[in-house]
Image (cartoon, helix red, strand yellow):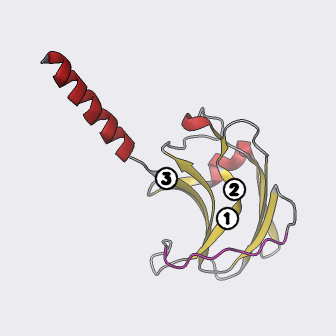
Amino acid sequence: MYKAIKLIFGITIILCLTSCSWQEYFIISNTSQSEVIMSYNIKEVEKGFPIFTNQPLLYKLNSSNGIDWYTKQIPIDSDTSLTGFKLKIPAGYAVIFGELNNDHYTAYNQDFINARVFNLKKLDILQNNNTIIIVPTSFDSYFKKINGNNLFEIK
C-alpha cells in the first residue's frame, strides 16, 4: 500500500512538472517615432542550445505598446552571414531575437538549465545617427525584466 501511494505521488509530481513550461523572450521594442536599425552577431554554439537566434521575428505593437501576437513577420536580413543579422525596426514594432525555455534570465553569465548558452557577441542599435553598442557585459544594463520578458525599449 505504501509503495502504491509513493508511486502515485511520484507520477503526479512528474506530470505536474512536465506540464509547467514557460518562455522568456528577448525583445527590442521601438516605441519611438522613427525607424531603427538593429544589427547583431552571435556565437556558433558547439555544445548546448543558443538563446539568441539568426531568425528573429518582427511584430507590430498594440495600443499599449505590447506585442500584437497576430502580426508576426519575418524581417529581411541585410547581413548575409550565418552569425550576423541586420534589420530595420519600423516605429511601432518589436523584434524577438532570443528565447529562453523553462528558465529565468538573471544575468548574461549565469549558469542556465537545459544547456542554454548566452551566445550574443555584440548588438548595435542605430537611431537618428546615434549608435548604441551592447556587448555581453553591458547587456543587463539595457535589457530589463518586464512581464516575464527581457525588454529593451527604444523611445
Q: What residue is pinned by disc 3?
A: 23
Direction from residue 78 to residue 17 in the image, left or right: left
Q: Which residues are magenta?
A: 68-78
Q: Label 2 to label 1, Cα distance in Å?
A: 6 Å
Q: What residue is pinned by disc 2?
A: 53
Image quarter (top left, top right, bottom left or bottom right) of the N terminus: top left
The picture places residue 98, in percent across and down from the top left corner, at 63, 55
Q: Is residue 93 above or below residue 28?
A: below
The picture places residue 41, in percent across and down from the top left corner, at 80, 54
Q: Label 3 to label 2, Cα distance in Å?
A: 15 Å
Which residue is at a point 48% across and 44% down the rendered structure image?
Answer: 102
Q: Main secondary structure of the magenta part?
A: loop
Q: Is residue 94 above or below residue 111?
A: below
The residue under label 2 is which amino acid type? Thr
Earlier-in-chain disc, 3 versus 2: 3
Earlier-in-chain disc, 3 versus 1: 3
